[in-house]
Amino acid sequence: MLNQKNKVTRADYEQWRAGQDETAARIASDPDRLLFHVEPELGWLNDPNGLVQIGDTYHIYHQYDPFDAAHGGPVLWNHLTTKDFVTYENHGPVLFPDSDLDSSGAYSGSAFVRDGKIHYFYTGNVKHFDRDDYDYVLTGREQNQIHMVTDNPDELGEKQLAIGPLDYPSDIGTHVRDPKVLEHNGVYYMVLGARTKDDRGCVLVFTSCDLESWAYATRIELDEKFGFMWECPDLFELDGELVLVCCPQGVPAEGWRYHNPHQCVWFRIEADWDARSFKIADQGMPPMVDAGFDFYAPQSFEDAAGRRLMIGWVGCPDATVKNPTVERGWQCALTVPRQLSMHNGKLCQWPARELEKLRGAGVHVHAGEGAAEPGRLFDAVVSCSEVKTVELRIREGVTVRYADGMLTLDMDDEGYGRDVRSVEVDELRDLRVLSDTTLVEIFANGGEAALTSRTYSPAVSTMELHAEGSAEMEIYRLAQ
């Protein structure tokens, strides 16, 4: 078995993969495989990386451990393409931890296009397992920010060190990773997730005029400690606002918020571009991007149509929930692409319009009625007016309900460790449930709230809509 203590080359992977055809075929025929989501051919998948559109083709990379579905092996980048977000072509691994800069893993990163060239940035992880002072947090470890330039998204270019451990502020530990680049008025800003030596999460900001030479500028942080590490930062402009999405680790639950092991939140940022200064506008509890059981490490990009699209990892680090497919050799997935917008000060997300191509004929039902045999593949859209309660059982043992200003996903005994997740909403105007075979993505009020979760329970015989108030539902069967 290949492991994180040794480099992994393309030749190493290809030699291993040559003996996996029978396993890959068995996994491909598994009835729990997804219809329209990205998932691993073998093993484990996590963070989306390097999202970019070249011509009419979207390129999606992701963290990939094909060797171990429980994720104990080395981390590569896998590469897929799509033109429609419905069908995907898997090109296999394209980035390997094969150098002294990334010998313990090719960690997360991003893509940035300038003058016909694609600039890839990612974190090369190096763990000095043989050192007595290796402790994972403060010593015995390097995280190198690596730069590659190419005009071919199938071949990512030569690895060059862009930012290394000597470039980080002196109070920062060995956790610095996940570069993402924003351009504003001819200046490039790279954000990096970081952990201070006294265990406070923050985002480091580096600047460049040429995408080659980078200098530390400042950091983004809250006044009070909020977790020990802020992973996967994404700084972008959206509808006149500057937004930071990131994933704080080690935040305790508070009320209905922050019940997953680690969180994904967003902030409004006030920028003084001339002074290279960025401040978090609201110093309270940051809103969650998605309140479900399985959502983490999202990344966004702007496509040729000007849409800001975001894709997240359907999973979470250190999760105690279980996925029964691990025993069958695979687990985890990516969300569908979600178009982002700002509305009334809220970050809204909605499935990309291409997903509607999957819809068959719709069945219309009113509150108190049901749609027979909906199956596990459906897109249900509920419209509401002045409702006090709404309840929709979407799978056996899985219910979505609204009452007392809370939207709740209740997994009952069918969640493999998942129980209940809720999100506060002022009222319920609409609800959308996008259901794949073993995954549901739920959106409320035009995407002001979202809940994503794996579910391995069977379909209901009849999907009934119950409501106090006016509610009706259109439910579409889905098929490619």
Image (cartoon, rainbow, N blue to C red):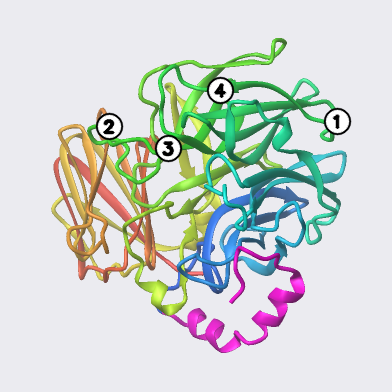
Task: Say which label, 2 or 4, has the lower sequence index.
Answer: 4
Mark 3 secondary-structure assignment:
loop
Mark 1 vs mark 2: in front: 1
Mark 3 vs mark 1: in front: 1
Mark 2 vs mark 4: in front: 4
Task: Check disc 2 and give the amino acid type.
Answer: Val
Task: Say which label, 3 or 1, has the lower sequence index.
Answer: 1
Which label was assigned to residue 425?
Answer: 2
Q: CA distance from mark 4 to mark 3?
A: 18 Å
Task: Magenta stretch: give its range.
Answer: 1-30
Characterize the local packing of mark 4: few (<14), some (14-19) or many (20 or more) Cα atoms within 10 angstroms: some
Residue at 44% in and 22% down: 345
Mark 2 secondary-structure assignment:
loop
Task: Check disc 1 and give the amino acid type.
Answer: Asp
Outermost residue to the front = 132
Task: Say which label, 3 or 2, has the lower sequence index.
Answer: 3
Determine whether label 3 and label 2 are within 8 Å by CB: no
* Residue at the spot of label 3: 289
Which label was assigned to residue 220?
Answer: 4
Mark 4 secondary-structure assignment:
strand
* Residue at the spot of label 1: 210
Q: Magenta span has 6? A: yes
Q: CA distance from mark 3 to mark 1?
A: 32 Å
Q: Magenta span has 23? A: yes
Mark 3 vs mark 2: in front: 3
x, y (%) of residue 99?
77, 58
Mark 4 vs mark 3: in front: 4
Q: Quadrant of residue 114?
A: top right
Residue at 42% in and 37% down: 289
Task: Say which label, 4 or 3, has the lower sequence index.
Answer: 4
Tell whether 256 sits left or right of 356.
left
Establish if 460 lies above or below 470: below
